[in-house]
Amino acid sequence: MDLESFARLLTDDGQTALAEAGAMLGTGAGPVEAVSALRRRFDPDLVSAALTQAGLRRRAAAKFGDEAARMYFTPHGLEQATRPEVAGHRAKRLAGLSVADACCGIGGDLIAQARAGCEVDAVDLDPLTVAVATANTQALGVRTTVRLADATTLDPSAYDALFADPARRTTKGRVFDPAAYSPAWDVILDLIGRANRACLKVAPGIPYEYIPDGMEAEWVSFRGEVKEAVLWSGSSGRRATLLPYGETMTARGVEADVALIGRYLYEPDGAAVRAHLVGEVAEILGGWLIDPQIAYLSADSHVPTPWAAGYLVEEVMPFSLKRLRSALRERKVGAVTIKKRGSAVDVEKLRHDLRLSGEGSAVVLLTRLGTRPVAVIASEMGR
């Protein structure tokens, strides 16, 4: 989709075509059927743009809920856009401030910031992205400024806070190396250095050596899946936040003991693992590490907590395909969830090689104790 095609979607004919495309996809019409029906009333270019946008809206519903039906997207913009619950959590720390959004994308964060009472001046280098972000603010009734500009032209000191969400995707796919972000990492650091206050959204797997001194690193998890890391100026340390629970935890230097696997095994939330807060989670559980290098915890009691998924241990054995298969078949297990930490086993190959049948279910956790690979058969207790 190019800028001209998107602009046509905002016309009266474009809105009609988009509404009809959405209705057809909503009733399960196939691509050929939808194209044929729409081309009776609209030209091929408009039909293509409408169906593309309608398809993106359907995909976006999983992230943006009911508002997706009124919003506009690009494929890359949707992929990188922040889930509203996560953007809203972050916006609370910027509430009421004047904010420079240095690379606004399709507008997910600037919308959350505006709703939190921020006065947002948002820029992006791509004309189509700016048009999409502008359309989204108008569609959702959000008052803010979106303009075409290079982030390097901003004067961060003119605002209360700088927010930056650098692009982490290229035509080749997702980018994991911060040095390959856009704007470039050195540009981002320069902007942060000149800002009164800064908030930088980065990939959750950011190497620790890239975290600037004097910035707080916060890892955010939504329903058990780590979504992002955020670097905040004006504070320091490590933090993990769980949404939608609203739970947050900061590092206090707690070190967990190491002991054998007890009655329960716990898998700490990924945000706590990334933030190196496994010791703090162990303290909540009254538990211990099963290996100093593996982020599995154990305890002799079940402690429900959003910070860890719990499993009732049924059997611990040295890892062996034959022995594991036999133990699962004795339990008449046909459905198995396989998890691993510190194990080199190919999970999908193992699932195939187990050749299970039966009405029961179980969880198998593959890990190691020292140098010994082990398999734990367990039942899920939840959080």
Image (cartoon, rainbow, N blue to C red):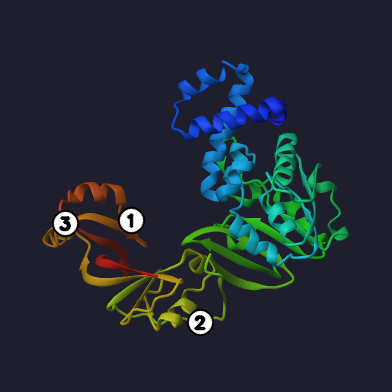
Residue 75 at what x, y percent from top left? 59, 37
What element does badge 1 sit on? loop
**Between marks 1 and 3 in the image, the one whose residue lies nearer the viewer:** 3
Measured along the vertical axis of the image, is residue 85 above or below residue 80? below
User: In the image, what residue occupies the spot 57% across and 49% down?
Assistant: 64
User: In the image, what residue occupies the spot 51% across and 65% down?
Assistant: 271
Binning the other alpha carbons within 10 Å of mark 1 as few (below 14), some (14 to 19) or many (20 upward) gives few
User: In the image, what residue occupies the spot 64% across and 60% down?
Assistant: 88
Q: Which mark is residue 325?
A: 3
Q: Quadrant of the C terminus?
A: bottom left
Q: Amino acid at mark 2?
A: Val
**Residue picked out by circle 1:** 344
Mark 1 or 3 closer to N-term?
3
Would residue 195 appear left or right of 20 to someone viewing this image?
A: right
Cα gap from disc 3 to disc 2, whole angstroms: 38 Å
| Displayed quadrant of residue 124 | top right
Nearer to us in this view, 209 or 359: 359
Q: Amino acid at mark 3?
A: Arg
Residue 52 at what x, y percent from top left? 57, 30
Mark 2 or 1 closer to N-term?
2
Q: Amino acid at mark 1?
A: Ala
Mark 3 or 2 closer to N-term?
2
| Displayed quadrant of residue 132 | top right
Residue 139 at what x, y percent from top left? 70, 43
**Residue picked out by circle 2:** 254
**Between marks 2 and 1 in the image, the one whose residue lies nearer the viewer:** 2
**Do callouts 1 and 3 mark residues in contact (Cβ within 8 Å)?**
no
What element does badge 2 sit on? loop
Measured along the vertical axis of the image, is residue 153 above or below residue 190? above
Q: Which mark is residue 225?
A: none
Cα gap from disc 1 to disc 3, whole angstroms: 18 Å
Q: Quadrant of the N terminus?
A: top right
